[in-house]
Image (spheres, rainbow, N blue to C red):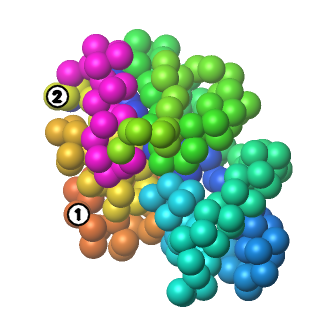
Amino acid sequence: MRYKCVIFDLDGTILDTLDDLADAANAALAACGYPARTKDEVRRFVGNGIRKLIERATPDGVSDEDIVRTHEAFTAYYSAHCKDKTRPYEGIPELVSELKANGIRTAVVSNKADYAVKKLCEEYFGGIFDIAIGEREGIRKKPAPDSVLEVMRALGAEADYTIYIGDSDVDIMTAQNSGIGCIGVSYGFRGREFLESHGADVIADTVGELRNLLLT
């Protein structure tokens, strides 16, 4: 099948953001008097938005008020430092350009805060995506299909010719809830075994394999 629309997750799929996320989480935790987390712990916490990351990173039993305070500290740090160590996965910019050259519409749908999604996509991809959106007030986060369906409507994309690319169980569920196919990528924040255990039918271990699945 030749796809006409490819929608990507961001963290762990097109950008390696883990170091900056871990730095921001630990800066926020330190500012609020909580112990630091390892990078591997932060890796496991990512995927359901910043609020959930903070809930997972803070010690058990903290109040909702303290979670809000830590969330605010994270946002203040991350908005200034989200590009310090983040980089595209090797081959991703070329892949997106090739998709566009073949007339395929491309988009990003992420649970990362919308300001960061737009900032990072502009920084590293120069506006090549047709649409890039993140978590917004009043819109249900993934795995709810709301943002994916919004993108599909905006691009005139049909479900049979649309594919979602992501690295987590949340992405697999998002595609299922949106009525579209999914390709899991094991080079990101989760590995092949994790993706298989969460129902991924198709997995790309490298960006080269992903290219072949999308364009061959």
Query: Which one is in front, 203 or 156?
Result: 156
Mark 1 falls on what kind of element? loop
The spot of residue 76 in percent (x, y) is 77, 51
Q: CA distance from mark 1 to mark 2?
A: 19 Å
Query: Which one is in front, 106 or 56?
Result: 56
Residue at the (36%, 35%) spot, across then down: 147
Which residue is labeled 2 in the image?
A: 160
Q: Is residue 120 above or below residue 199?
A: above
Q: Earlier in the sequence, mark 1 or mark 2?
A: 2
- Please indicate whether residue 105 sits to the left or right of residue 187 in the image: left
Q: Is residue 136 above or below residue 16?
A: above
The spot of residue 170 in percent (x, y) is 35, 57
Q: Is residue 5 above or below residue 194?
A: above
- Please indicate whether residue 186 sits to the left or right of residue 144 in the image: right
The spot of residue 205 in percent (x, y) is 44, 57
Q: Is residue 12 above or below residue 56?
A: above
Mark 2 falls on what kind of element? helix
Which amino acid, mark 2? Asp
Residue at the (81%, 50%) spot, across then down: 81
The spot of residue 176 in percent (x, y) is 20, 48
Residue at the (50%, 32%) spot, across then down: 133
Q: Kindly identify which numbered label has been placed on residue 199.
A: 1
Residue at the (58%, 81%) spot, across then down: 62
